[in-house]
């Protein structure tokens, strides 16, 4: 497997795209208010937790 090297800005941009295009509808709910979402910019996998 080849390593991928992205700048912090590229990672943020890719994660924002994934959020807006793929998972926003699924995660924006009252039960997730105040929680943190972490998105893997390479795979699109994500997790939601109150403590990060």
Image (cartoon, rainbow, N blue to C red):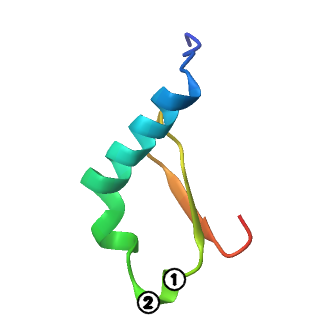
The residue that mark 1 highlights is 33
Cβ atoms at labels 2 and 1 below 8 Å apart = yes
Residue 37 picture quarter: bottom right
- Secondary structure at badge 1 equals loop
- Secondary structure at badge 2 equals helix
Q: Position of residue 36 (x, y in %)?
A: 60, 67
Mark 2 Cα-neighbour bin, 10 Å: few <14, some 14–19, many ≥20 = few
The N terminus lies in which quarter of the figure? Answer: top right
Residue 2 numbered mark, or none: none
C-alpha distance separating marks 2 and 1:
5 Å
Farthest-out residue, right: 51
Q: Nearer the viewer, residue 42 or 19?
A: 19
Q: Position of residue 31 (x, y in %)?
A: 49, 88
Q: Nearer the viewer, residue 34 or 23?
A: 34
Residue for point 34% across, 71% down:
26
Residue for point 34% across, 60% down:
23
The residue that mark 2 highlights is 30
């Amino acid at each position: 497997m080849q390593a991928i090297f992205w700048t912090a800005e590229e990672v943020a941009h890719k994660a924002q795209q994934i959020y807006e295009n793929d998972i926003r509808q699924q995660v924006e709910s009252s039960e997730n208010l105040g929680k943190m979402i972490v998105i893997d910019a390479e795979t699109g996998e994500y997790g939601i937790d109150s403590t990060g």
